[in-house]
Amino acid sequence: MLRTTLAGLRAHKLRLLLTAVAITLGVGFISGTFVLTDTMDKGVAKTFAKSADKVDFAVVPKSDDPEKGISADTLRKVRALPGVTDVHGMVKGEAALVGKDGKAVGDFPTVGMSVPSGPLLRYDVDKGRPPSGGGETVLDSGTAQREGFTVGDTVTILDDGNHPHSFNVVGVVDFGIDQDAAFQGAVGFDTRTAIAMTGEKAYREIDIAGGDRAAIEAAAGPSNEVYTGTELGALLAKAAGADTEVIRTGLLIFGLVAMLVSALVIYNTFSILIAQRMREMALLRCVGATRRQVFGGVVAESAAVGLAGSLLGLAAGVGLGEGALVAISRLDVGVDVAAPSLTVRTIVAGLAVGTVVTVLSAMLPARAATRVAPVAALRSDPEPSSGRFRLGRLRTAIAVLLGAAGLAVGGLGSLAMDKGEAAMYVVAIAGGVFFLAVIAAMPALVRPLGRLVGAAPARLGGVPGRLAVANAQRAPRRTATTTIALTVGVGLMSLFAVIAASGKATAADKLEEQFPAEFQIQTQNADGRVPQALAEALRDRPGIAAVAETRRQETKIGGEEGRIATVTPSALGTTVKPEMKEGALGAALEPGTAMVDEATAGQPGYGIGRTIRVETPHGTVPVKITAVYGLGAQLAGIIVPEADFTRYFGTVDPSALYIKTHDGVPAAAARRAVEDAAQPYPAAKVTSAAEFKETMTEAIDMILMVFAGLLGLAIVIALFGIANTLTLSVVERTRESALLRAVGLTKRQLRRMLSVEALVMAVIGASTGVVLGIAFGWAATNAMADDSLFALPYLQVTGFVVLAGAAGTVAAVMPARRAARTSIVESLAHD
């Protein structure tokens, strides 16, 4: 029986090739994910080990709060310990670098860091040397290159009060994988200067050369943790490795989707092969093969195909992982990129997943093979049934129950539950359950969907078109299994497209409704202030219709630390439009009153009608809460009338300015006017609603592009399934094709028939996926938040169907050419 199975594999190698390709793609994605993330883990560990080996011991605070760092007293105690040869207290805060245009660089202040000049220097100095005096600084490599600075230049850096200071650049430093430095850019000083520039009063870490661990632990105290250099390297590597865990999980999810689609393709392939080899199985039974032997032969065949495809998938995975590593290395993320890492776990996982999925997918066809009676060997080669198809009571009941459960759970998540993450998970579960119902019911849907999708091809394609539509409908189970694989990929892509479009529409609506101002000016430092003179200068500029100011002041409220804010009275309700939840906006503008956001209102003592005690330089004053507003419109916390705020705290510079321009003023001209007014103030950053919307849209589109690329793999595998089905169908219908040729069908018409058949199957699968994606995209959008807007990207979802149809047609090229080349006489003699 083993020899028979091996002979069968050699005889049907062309039939099984596309199945092996589907397995290869699925396993390649999974193994490539492991190769990529394992190599990244190794690179991260190597990078941190290189830094940590210069440290004998490190003291790290147990609290993640930077304000509760390590005190100067602790640093002095550690420095005085016997055996300690060098100590560096790491300081990290914000110190904004001013670019050559006179404005602070980036959207966030650059990080100000202390950089040691001795043996505890953990960073690579690309050019120059570390700073050693109060007038010297170093820049991180990315910022220096981006802004055009180099060693010997003089730069301006703002301290924590936004006061400018001049420094001489003495070095360009690679700060490695420090996330703050990579995201915001960094400037480095000696320790004393770093404290003065950042205003930090505590150290983030103390690095030590020499000393005794027990003595260092005693000096560090119970609020700090002591690590050796090796332990510090492992700790930092583990912290950075958490990101690769997220990447691995996300990519593996898409890999599992690819394997699900592969399983559908494999199941369909083996089902067709068993149907075509019914006489072969019957002959085996006639010559003495038992049911168990026939079952074992099919399973062995599937295992061989699965193993071969998995081995190819491992090779493809190494290639995919190496390609991704090349792309990552070009991004210059500060991590040493190691050689591709193919671990034993990756090999075992890839082979196990590919082989097990293939064998499990072939189990049902293998069981069907055991039910072939020996007498079937005497019958003619069977054709797929074109009679009336029924689901059967059990399958109908399962489809109805799963469909009803999916709709009920989806309705619960999108309509009944509180909006948020939990509701979205419920909707996701509902989508999975309903999709199972679609799988169960799909064979019954093939014919009505085929009539609908095939109406135009049947009418426009003549006889080949009508034959193609009939062929797509004649074997509902086969067509359903083929098309459902495409439904998975297109459905998920449609879902993400709807969510992305709805997210952009919601954000744009909130931006327009709650903050209709065209420009915003504030400092990079969230706690900084904009000079009042800038607001006055803007009001004098032609084309500026209104300038709204927001101010805030830290104080004590009811004996606890808090913040009071105010807004220009004329701007409330016009330029700044808070959504009132309780009370009226006018009531919150009366003297002695305040309005609070709904989150603050939920705290004890801050509900509407309550009176709070606000501490001012002149004493404590009572303030009555008369209104509650929703979060948004750049407002948060306790808002009092501007006159009251000035009476409480005196004249305070604005924390932010919101500028509205006159109608008809070109956006470019308005932008120039605002930037010209802000030019004398380096810390003042100008942003616009249009720019914010564009940035947001680009970010969402980028995420969608990544998802589309990953899900595209599932669609490619599904198209291989269509090609596989057509290839096997061509073999199955050899005599039928020959008869059609004999009665006058030309080679071109035969190719057209098979191409239209593939087109119909692809559009059935893609249309079903689009409908499911739109429906659950609506449910997911509705579950996100109460004010989410649903938007349907018509062009995108239409494009999915069109592209799927075109790809399906391309997938039919090879099977159609094979059918057209077959000799009529030889085909009629085929048995």
Image (cartoon, rainbow, N blue to C red):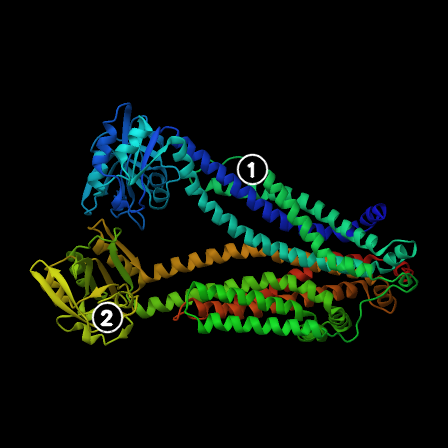
Q: Nearer the viewer, residue 549 or 441?
A: 441
Residue depicted at 24% across the width and 33% down the height: 75
What percent of the width, then of the height, locates residue 368? Answer: 79, 61
The residue tagged 1 is 341
Q: Nearer the viewer, residue 659 or 230?
A: 230
Vertical order, 412 against 81 (above or below): below
- Mark 1 to mark 2: distance in Å? 59 Å
Is residue 464 left or right of 659 when viewed as pictured?
right
What percent of the width, then of the height, locates residue 622? Answer: 12, 67
Please rate how many residues cluster around mark 2, counting C-alpha atoms within 10 Å: few if below 14, some from 14 to 19, many from 20. Answer: many
- Callout 2: SS: loop
Indicate the quadrant where residue 632 lies: bottom left
Indicate the quadrant where residue 606 lies: bottom left
Q: Nearer the viewer, residue 47 or 575?
A: 47
Is residue 286 left or right of 341 when viewed as pictured?
right
Q: Hey, what amino acid is under mark 2?
A: Gly
Please rate how many residues cluster around mark 1, counting C-alpha atoms within 10 Å: few if below 14, some from 14 to 19, many from 20. Answer: some
Q: Hey, what amino acid is under mark 1?
A: Ser
What percent of the width, then of the height, locates residue 283? Answer: 90, 57
Total numbered labels placed on residues in the image: 2
